[in-house]
């Protein structure tokens, strides 16, 4: 029996595929909980109305959408996710790290699976090298684009800033 090194055996890829799978599930649950469950990261009815009014005064198309009924008023007890709350959260370095981990683990997990498919089905060496090269370029581009999006997220100043909302609520 021929001895294979860990690198050639695929043991690391097999093991880390499971580790990233578990990490992605945990990160997804965290993301889902913060984004879609009632937490302090959500807006209340009064805050939503302040934001809606500020946008209506600044953007004629937004005002028109409200008049046409495309943008409704907040309903009592409704969990509201506003752009202002999302940008405030995305400005926080903890959420930037959270999202970068989500990105890196997701890219590794997904592309490790693609590499396994390439290894299983593409036998022609030059074609395999070409496809793997293209895949690495795609990984690099997605990592750069995703990282830049996460790092720069949350710097936009909306018509009514979150500091005005929080200050106006006190």
Image (cartoon, rainbow, N blue to C red):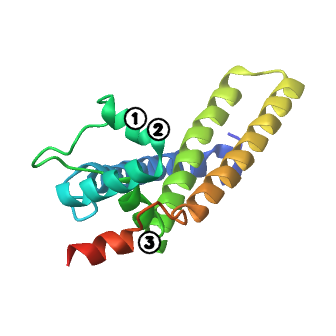
Total numbered labels: 3
Residue 170 is left or right of residue 5, and the answer is: left
Count neighbours of disc 3 (C-alpha within 10 A) and say few if under 14, some if 14 to 19, many if 20 or more: few
Q: How far apart are marks 2 and 1 (CA)?
A: 5 Å
What secondary structure is found at the residue carrying circle 2? helix
Q: Pointer 3: what residue?
A: 94
* Residue at position x 73%, y 40% in the image: 138
> Toward which corner of the image does residue 54 lie, by quadrant?
bottom left
What secondary structure is found at the residue carrying circle 3? helix
Quadrant where the C terminus is found in the figure: bottom left
Q: Which of marks 2 and 3 is nearer the N terminus?
A: 2
Quadrant where the N terminus is found in the figure: top right
Q: Which of marks 2 and 3 is in front?
A: 2
Q: Pointer 2: what residue?
A: 61
Q: x, y percentage for residue 136?
A: 76, 43
- Residue 26, above or below 60: below
Q: Which of marks 3 and 1 is nearer the N terminus?
A: 1
> Toward which corner of the image does residue 109 lie, by quadrant?
top right
* Residue at position x 22%, y 42% in the image: 73
Front one among 22 and 151? 151
Q: Distance between the residues labelled 2 and 3?
A: 35 Å
The reply to whether dot 3 and dot 1 touch (C-beta < 8 Å) is no
Q: x, y percentage for residue 19?
A: 45, 53
* Residue at position x 21%, y 73% in the image: 169
Specify the label residue 64 is tagged with: 1
What secondary structure is found at the residue carrying circle 1? helix
Q: x, y percentage for residue 117?
A: 63, 27
Residue 163 visible within the image? yes
Residue 22 visible within the image? no
The reply to whether dot 2 and dot 3 touch (C-beta < 8 Å) is no
The reply to whether dot 2 and dot 1 touch (C-beta < 8 Å) is yes
């Amino acid at each position: 029996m021929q001895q294979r090194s860990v690198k050639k055996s695929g043991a690391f890829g097999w093991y880390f595929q499971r580790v990233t799978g578990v990490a992605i599930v945990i990160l997804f649950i965290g993301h889902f909980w913060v984004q879609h469950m009632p937490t302090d990261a959500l807006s209340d009815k009064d805050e939503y109305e302040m934001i809606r009014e500020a946008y209506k005064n600044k953007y004629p198309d937004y005002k028109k959408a409200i008049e046409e009924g495309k943008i409704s008023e907040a309903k009592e007890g409704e969990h509201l996710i506003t752009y202002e709350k999302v940008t405030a959260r995305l400005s926080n370095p903890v959420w930037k790290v959270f999202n970068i981990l989500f990105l890196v683990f997701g890219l590794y997990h997904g592309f490790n699976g693609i590499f396994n498919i390439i290894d299983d089905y593409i036998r022609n060496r030059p074609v395999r090298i070409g496809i793997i090269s293209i895949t690495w370029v795609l990984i690099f581009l997605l990592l750069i684009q995703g990282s830049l999006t996460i790092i720069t997220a949350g710097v936009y100043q909306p018509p009514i800033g979150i500091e005005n909302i929080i200050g106006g609520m006190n």
